[in-house]
Image (cartoon, helix red, strand yellow):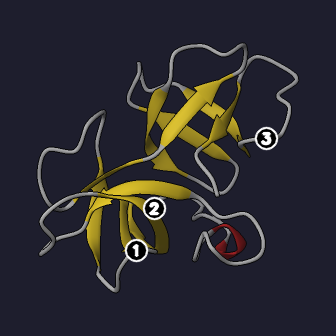
Amino acid sequence: MGRPINKKFIGNTGATGQQIAATAWIPGQGAPYTDAYITKQTGTGRYIMRANAGVASGQVSLVNGALTAPGQANITVTPYGGGAVEYAAVIFDNTVRTFTNNTTYDWKFEGITLTAPGQATIQSD
């Protein structure tokens, strides 16, 4: 699975600190939640996510683009220079690999200034 995400970046996006945010269609729910967050990393590109708007939680896999079925989630990644938005395929402690050409970036939270190519911001609270 690689080096897992640091636990300080996992959790309720409504809490103090910065956490990774997502859009997730949690199994058993009728539609995606745009306010989801990771509660546990279960494998490469697989996570347990929960929605702030409800009490639902469940395992999801990251996908490239719009969600089309329960069990899917996406996390946006914006490369240095403001390039086209990409979607995370796998998130590690310090890097994120996207579906776009399997590109790997050093990730930072939204709102932090990127200083060089090879860096990208990741969707956050």
Q: Which mark is residue 35?
A: 2
Q: Which mark is residue 78?
A: none
Secondary-structure class at tag 1: loop
Secondary-structure class at tag 3: loop
- If you read the primary sequence from the N terminus, does the residue marked by circle 3 or circle 2 appear first? 2
Q: Is residue 31 left or right of residue 92?
A: left
Q: In the rendered image, which quarter is residue 4 located in?
A: bottom right
The answer to whether the residue labelled 3 contacts the one labelled 2, judged by CB atoms less than 8 Å apart, is: no
The answer to whether the residue labelled 2 contacts the one labelled 1, judged by CB atoms less than 8 Å apart, is: yes
- In the rendered image of this protein, does residue 52 appear above or below residue 43? below
Find the distance from the CA under tag 3 to the CA under tag 1.
24 Å
In the rendered image, residue 35, in percent from the top left (x then y), is placed at 45, 62
The amino acid type found where label 1 is placed reads: Ala
Residue ID for mark 3: 111
Q: How many marks?
A: 3
In the rendered image, residue 38, in percent from the top left (x then y), is placed at 48, 69
Give the quadrant of the N terminus: bottom left
In the rendered image, residue 46, in percent from the top left (x then y), is placed at 34, 62
In the rendered image, residue 7, in percent from the top left (x then y), is placed at 65, 75
The answer to whether the residue labelled 3 contacts the one labelled 1, judged by CB atoms less than 8 Å apart, is: no
Q: At x 58% / y 46%, what residue is drawn?
A: 123
Q: In the rendered image, which quarter is residue 8 located in?
A: bottom right
Q: At x 53% / y 51%, what residue is drawn?
A: 91
Q: Which mark is residue 53?
A: 1
Find the distance from the CA under tag 2 to the CA under tag 1.
7 Å
Q: At x 72% / y 13%, what residue is drawn?
A: 81
